[in-house]
Amino acid sequence: MQKIEKIILGLIVLLSVSCSQDILDKEPQSSFSAQGFYKTTSDAQAGVYGIYESLQSNYRINFAYWGEGRADAIETNHSGDPLILRQNTLNKTMNSAQWSSLYETISRANYAIKYVPEVSVDEFGLQLVGQARALRALSYFYAVRVWGDVPLILEPYESVDQELFVPKTDKELVLDQIVEDLQYAAENCRDSYGGERDRVLITQGGANALLTQVYMWRKDYQNANATADLVLNNSLYSLVSMADWSKIFTTGFSNESIFEVGYNEVQTNALRVLYALGSDSDYYPSERFKNSFEDNDLRKSKIYDTTVVTTRKIWKFFGEGFSDESADPSSNNIVLARLADIILLKAEALNKLGQTDEALELLNRIRTRAGLENLDQASAIANYGDVDSAIFHERSIELSFEGHRWFDLVRTDRAIEIMQPINGLSDPANLVWPIHEDAINRNPNLEQNSFYR
């Protein structure tokens, strides 16, 4: 891991010049020749590590803004994006409407996908391209879920003869490309790199986990069930005990983790500002969320400060009892995919396919760890209305504040039902973000999303 971090640190300056800062910028980035950079297999590996480096800026704060900020589990006292998202008053100048960091990752991936095969034609080259395609897919998956239709760019920008002003592509076609990229990664990435690298590099298991998330977004339950099964049967992954549950987030690299974005003391994120500064953090748990816990849930005191009436601290990412009020950046990794997520997605898929008993068995694996009684179909209906809702509720607790809740609301068609009483959300066109004005101003072929025109 230290070797990877040193390589990434060395690439920051190089790749900030090498790759376009904004793929939709009018000005050609002619100072970099990818052909000149990709000369050896070491260059190929370094180029792919540079894609991972770009993830750090993508998700340092936006994983929460995009995945939690518009949902029902959080409250905020902060102005700016936290309040805008909570009140559903999105606008084209807010920070979370910018997609430039995602397209930076896509740009780096496109260079690697094109040039790695020219210097590494063996199995090593295939798995490097697999990682690059998976990271491109991950970036587009966020883009589609946040903005809907987005420009689909699959080639590096290298010539003034290329189209500068790329229009939006239908989101279903983008999702088709995402699936194709992840299927390639699932076939060509390594099953294991050894040790901590299995959690911060894309493995076959990581690609299958991301495929499961994509299939569930598309309501493709047959394929989601199949890819989830590959993850559940992968020996790299196992549920940790409740005693070690917090370590998934506080320490990282747990057996439950499938893919996490790595940070350190130099390359940091905003977890503390988001969740851990007590009265001054961006977000704290909503009353709705706190009231949704079942009695005796062992996760409750590990997720937020239960010692006070007015809760202002989310403990999940820093440990139970965390009280450091420093606003220093965090070096914790951000976990984007873990086994509990895939187990619950598989349970949801199985229930949709009519295999309710099998779905409940998976649901109860998560509940048992949390110290809760098993549910059968009758008790799931009695407590939550139906089995789907019981799984949906379990995801809200188990995966709380990890960047899943808003996307779960949208993909299960519950966003308007749940959020309308909270902030007035009522129009399906309002489920996506506005495109930032910078992108609109640079690209005359971009059209603002309909709700924000």
Image (tube, helix red, strand yellow):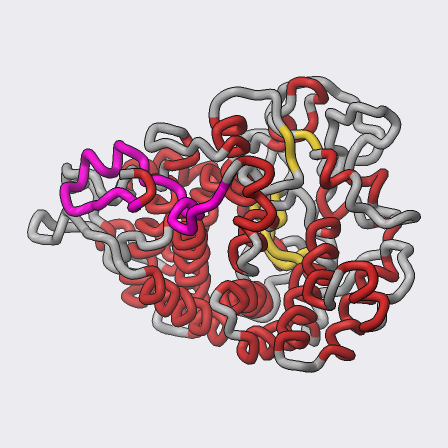
In the image, residue 157 above or below residue 234: above
- Is 228 on the left or on the right of 446, as rendered? right
Q: Residue placed at 91% from the left, 55% from the top? A: 371
The mark total stands at: 0
Q: Position of residue 50 (x, y in %)?
A: 42, 47
Residue farthest left in this picture: 161
In the foreground, 437 or 182 = 437
Residue 22 position by quadrant = top left
In the image, residue 259 above or below residue 165: below
> Magenta stretch containing residue 446, yes or no?
yes
- Residue 142 appearing in the image: yes
In the foreground, 376 or 123 = 376
Q: Residue placed at 35% from the left, 65% from the top? A: 172
In the foreground, 408 or 250 = 408
Q: Position of residue 256 (x, y in %)?
A: 72, 58
- Is 80 on the left or on the right of 359, as rendered? left
Q: Position of residue 155 (x, y in %)?
A: 24, 58
- The range drawn in magenta is 425-450
Q: Position of residue 228 (x, y in %)?
A: 62, 72
Residue 123 position by quadrant = bottom left
Q: Residue placed at 32% from the left, 38% from the top? A: 452
- Residue 60 appearing in the image: no
> Magenta stretch containing residue 248, yes or no?
no
- Is 402 on the left or on the right of 107, as rendered? right
Q: Residue placed at 76% from the left, 64% from the top? A: 238
Q: In which quadrant of the rendered image does the C terminus lie? A: top left
In the foreground, 377 or 142 = 377
